[in-house]
Amino acid sequence: MFKKKVSCLFLLFMIAAFSCVSQSNSSKFEAGAGFAAFVYQGDLTPDRFGSFVTTRPGVYLTAAKILGPAFMIRVNISFGSLRGDETKYDNPEYRKFRALKFRTPVAELSPQLVWHPLIKNNSTIGISPYLFGGAALAWFNVNRDYSGFDADYFGDATDIPERIQQDEEQRLPAFRIVMLAGAGMRYNLSERLAVHAELTYRFPFTDYLDGFSKAANPGQKDHYHSVSAGAVYRTGKKSSVACPVIKY
């Protein structure tokens, strides 16, 4: 009889414990939005880290599924634009006279895997750094402009006009698969609300993001990145079952 009572109590304890763990680790979702600054990095800027003088604004929406304390899967929808303009630079001098320009809107749909190395996905408050990576289906509509090219500055010996013509014959990117990676910092204001800031670097695998290759630097691919900040709200009901406190 005693063994049966112990067995029943043990079974009830296991059921309660399993119920507690299941509810505390139940899947949750979150959604948010924010603002971004898009920076072009390619042939039309001498700056190693991108053309910050032509930074363009953007916005994004995000939705995520929390997989556990360390990982989540999210989908971002981003809208922005990119711009490059050689007339913005005095050094090296030739850029102001070559005067190649471009602009393009950018739209992205990107699934991403997010990793919180400090295992704080379920934290109710505090700071949590994170890393992420994924791919994006990106849309561009590149408008290149070489109307400011100064042929007198370069002289008759230059072959830049011929190389510009070669670029004109190339098909410009429209829809592309873009690989991306980044890092961010999240601050949980409460169990529901958090703010975050992040840097995202993108690899479009083309040298025609700015519309030019042979007329500029055909040996180097174009890239772009963004700095963003926003807020997210976590949905789902708060766990109604609390884990029992065992006293000794």
Image (cartoon, rainbow, N blue to C red):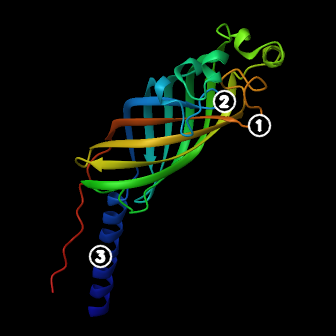
Q: What's the amino acid at mark 1?
A: Gly
The tally of labels here is 3
Mark 1 vs mark 3, foreground winner is 1
Identify the mark at residue 43; answer none if there is no mark.
Answer: 2
C-alpha span from label 1 to label 3: 67 Å
The one nearer the camera, 168 or 79, is 168
Q: In the picture, residue 218 is in which quadrant? A: top right
Residue 135 place in picture, x, y as percent:
61, 40
> Badge 3: few (under 14), some or many (20 or more) residues near its Cα, within 10 Å?
few
Query: In the picture shown, does residue 230 fall above or below 191?
Result: above
Q: What's the amino acid at mark 2?
A: Asp
Q: Secondary structure at mark 3?
A: helix
Does label 2 or label 1 sit earlier along the sequence?
2
Question: What residue do we see at 52% from left, 21% from top?
Answer: 88
> Badge 1: few (under 14), some or many (20 or more) residues near its Cα, within 10 Å?
few
Q: In the picture, residue 21 is in which quadrant? A: bottom left
C-alpha span from label 3 to label 2: 66 Å
Q: What's the amino acid at mark 3?
A: Phe
Q: Secondary structure at mark 2?
A: loop
Mark 3 vs mark 2, foreground winner is 2
Circles 2 and 1: CB atoms closer than 8 Å: no
Q: In the picture, residue 209 is in which quadrant? A: top right
| Residue named by callout 3 | 13
Quadrant into which the N terminus falls = bottom left
Whether residue 124 is visible, yes or no, is no
Quadrant into which the C terminus falls = bottom left
Identify the mark at residue 219; answer none if there is no mark.
Answer: 1
The one nearer the camera, 44 or 79, is 44
Does label 1 or label 3 sit earlier along the sequence?
3
Query: In the picture shown, does residue 104 fall above or below 182?
Result: above
Q: Is residue 216 left or right of residue 137?
A: right
